[in-house]
């Protein structure tokens, strides 16, 4: 099995286990992941680096006939895939960042105006399209297509460079970070 196949299996198992979990602590028999301890550890380390799980370790307790992975996970961060605390935009450098992955947004573009305006507010807060259009000086104030196109371009960039499926949500007259 490749690491990407192992990662997919691990995500499926963790999501299933979260349905029955009483808290953020999961005890999963190592066999459920259908991979070696070493490969499973590599994938779990990647999930921890991305902020999708808090910690992990193997445990062998007396009386158990198998070793278990003890995984601490925040369900919201794991299921959504991108913890809000990891998403940032640096307006000075034009850098959009998720964890350790970064991408540049060219300055003075509609994309940079959208990012600057949306990320100047608390993540998830609705930003009125008119506030974004105010920052796009050369635009026509009634042209919401500028914002729509910029949001789609940002989502495409975030998907390919940061691994985020849909970073921003656009609806008529407003935009927000999809957290």
Image: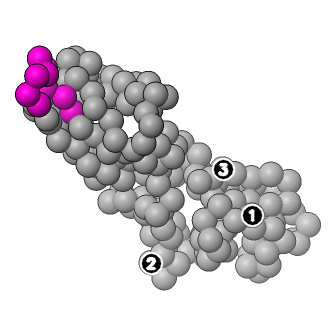
**Residue receiving disc 1:** 126
Task: Specify whether 47 is left or right of 139.
Answer: left
Please, what is the dominant secondary structure of the magenta stretch?
A: loop
Nearer-the-camera pick, 17 or 87: 17
Asked if residue 135 lies in the magenta stretch, the reply is no
- 93 relative to 82, above or below: below
**x and y percentages locating residue 174 in the rendered image:** 80, 60
Asked if residue 63 lies in the magenta stretch, the reply is yes
What residue appears at the point 11 percent right and 31 percent down from the top-left corner? 61
Measure the alpha-carbon separation of dots 3 and 1.
Answer: 17 Å
From the viewer's perspective, is the residue at label 1 or at label 2 nearer? 1
In the current view of this chain or complex, which residue is farthest to the right? 142
Measure the alpha-carbon separation of dots 1 and 2.
Answer: 24 Å
Q: Which mark is residue 177?
A: none
Quarter of the figure with the C terminus: bottom right
Quarter of the figure with the N terminus: top left
Does residue 144 appear in this view? Answer: yes
Mark closest to the chain's N terminus, 3 or 1: 1
What residue appears at the point 65 percent right and 69 percent down from the top-left corner? 118
The chosen color scheme is one colour
**x and y percentages locating residue 157 in the rendered image:** 52, 52
């Amino acid at each position: 099995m490749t690491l990407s196949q192992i990662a997919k299996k691990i995500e499926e198992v963790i999501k299933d286990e979260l349905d029955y979990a009483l808290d953020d602590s999961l005890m999963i028999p190592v066999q459920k992941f259908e991979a070696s301890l070493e490969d499973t550890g590599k994938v779990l380390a990647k999930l921890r680096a991305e902020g999708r799980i808090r910690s992990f370790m193997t445990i062998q307790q007396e009386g158990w006939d198998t070793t278990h992975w003890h995984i601490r996970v925040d369900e919201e961060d794991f299921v959504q895939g991108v913890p809000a605390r990891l998403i940032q935009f640096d307006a000075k450098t034009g850098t959009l960042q998720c964890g350790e992955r970064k991408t540049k947004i060219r300055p003075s573009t509609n994309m940079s105006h959208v990012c600057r305006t949306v990320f100047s507010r608390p993540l998830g807060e609705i930003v009125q399209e008119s506030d974004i259009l105010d920052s796009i000086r050369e635009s026509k104030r009634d042209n919401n297509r500028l914002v729509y196109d910029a949001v789609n371009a940002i989502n495409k960039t975030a998907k390919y460079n940061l691994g985020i499926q849909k970073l921003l949500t656009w609806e008529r007259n407003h935009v927000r970070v999809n957290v």
